[in-house]
Image (cartoon, rainbow, N blue to C red):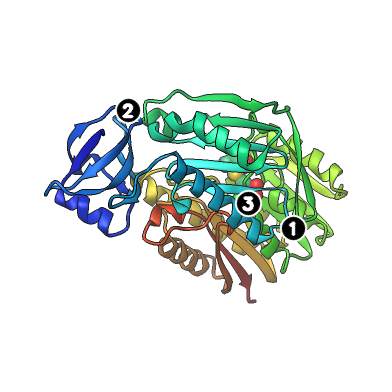
Amino acid sequence: MKSVTVSSRGEQRIRGGHPWIYRADVVDVDAGPGDIVAVIGPRRRTIGYALFSDRSQIPIRMLTHGDTPADAALIRERLSRAIRFRDTLALDATAYRLVHGEADLLPSLVVDKYGDYLVVQALSQGTDRLLPEITQMLVELLAPAGILARNDPKVRALEGLEQTVQVLHGHVPDSVVVREGPVSYDVDLHKGQKTGLFLDQRENREAAARYAHGRLLDCFSYHGGFALRLARQCPEAEALDISADAVRRIAENARRNGVPHLQAREVNVFDELRRLEKDGVRYDTIVLDPPAFAKNKASVPNALAGYKEINLRAMRLLNPGGYLVTCSCSYNVNEEMFGEMVVQASIDSHVPVALVEKRMQGRDHPVLVGVPETYYLKCFILRRVE
Ligand code: SAH
C-alpha cells in the first residue's frame, strides 16, 4: 500500500474533522500522483485513507478514518448516498447538484444533473484518476443519456492536470433545456460558466420571489437567473451584464419564458449604478450577484471595497420599502466580513436597511460542518426601511 506520513499537527487537523492536510504537514511520501494512500501519523499509526496529490498545496484529502479502506465499494456507496439525499429534497427543478465534493465525503468531485445529462468535475489528481470508475458507477446508478467532464476550471492547473472538456459517456448535445421552478433555460453545458448554470442560487431566487415587486434591476445577471424568476411579478425589469453573450442569452430566455418586458443591457455594473443614481432612476427590487471578487486572501481588502461600492449605490437606488438581494460567492470574504461590509454601506449611503433573511447556497450544495471552505455563498435580503 502506498503511504504518506504526516506531522503531529497534520494528525491533529484530521482528528479535528478537517479532511485536508497541507504540504507543510507532510513528512514523508511513498506514493505517486493520484494514488489512494494510507495516511500514517508520527507514531506510525494509520490515521485513515486519502487521495494523494504530488503537485497541490493540499496533498492529502481524507476519504476514511481508522482502518476503513477507501475502495471502489466505498466510493460507490457515497455516490449513491449523495444521490438519494437529493431525491429526498424533492427539488422543484430538473437541474441541481448531485455531488458537492467534501460535503458528500467525496472531496474534489462535483456532479451536476441537467435533465437527462450529467456534468462532472474532477478537481484533484485523485478524483481525476478515479474518473473512469466514477463514470461507470454513475451510468449504473442513474442511466444518464450522456456524461460531460467539465474539467476546465483553473484549479486543475494547480494539480498539474490539463484543462479539458470531453464527453465521457453517451452523447451531450450543444444545448439542453432544463427547468427551475417556473423558469426554463436553454443551457450550453460545454461552454457555459461553472457547469452551465449557477445552480447554487436556485433557492435564493425562490426566496427573492417572496419580496420582489415594482421595478426590478438584476445586476450581474449572467443568463438571467434572478431576473427571469422575478420579472413575472415585476412590471418593469432590467438585467445587466458585462458579457455580450450573456445579454443575448437573457434576451432569448426572456422570450422563451414569456417575460418580454425584461430588458437586458451590456454594461459594467460599477459604471451603470453611478449613472442611474445621477439620473435619478429608482427601483423597488435590486439584485447584486457579482463574481467572486476575492479569489485569494491578499485580494480581500480590494474585494470588500468593491462589494461596498456596489452595495451602497444599490441602497441609494432603492425606493423606501424596496428590497436589496445582495450576494457574495467569495469564500475568502466570510459571513462576518460580508455583514460588516453591509453595515458600512448602509452608514455611508445614509440608507437605513433591515436584514430580512440571511441565506447561503442551496440545500443541494450543503456545508460540511468544520470545513469553512465549503461555506462560500452568502445571500442577504435587505429591506430599505425608509
Ligand atoms: N446572477 C447570475 C450569476 C452571476 S455570475 C445567476 O443567478 O445565474 C456573474 C456575472 O457577472 C457573469 O455573467 C459576468 O459576466 C458578470 N460580470 C462580471 N463583472 C461584471 C461587471 N463589472 N459588470 C457587469 N457584469 C459583470
Residue at horizontal 29%, vertical 27%? 32
Task: Depth check: give the residue in front, 208 or 194.
Answer: 194
Q: Which mark is residue 216?
A: 1
Which amino acid type corresponds to the residue marked 2 in the rendered image?
A: Pro
- Mark 1 or mark 3, whichever is nearer to me: 1
Tell me if I can see residue 195 in this picture. no
Q: Is mark 3 within 8 Å of ligand 1?
A: no
In percent of width and height, residue 335 lies at 44, 62
Residue 16's place in the image compared with 145, above or below, is: below
User: Rounded to the nearest whole Å, what is the CA distance between mark 2 and mark 1?
Assistant: 50 Å
Q: Residues within 10 Å of mark 1 (few under 14, many from 20)?
A: many
Q: Which mark is residue 273?
A: 3
Mark nearer the N terminus (1 vs 3): 1
Task: Depth check: give the residue in front, 60 or 360.
Answer: 60
In percent of width and height, residue 25 lies at 19, 44
User: Rounded to the nearest whole Å, what is the CA distance between mark 3 and mark 2?
Assistant: 48 Å
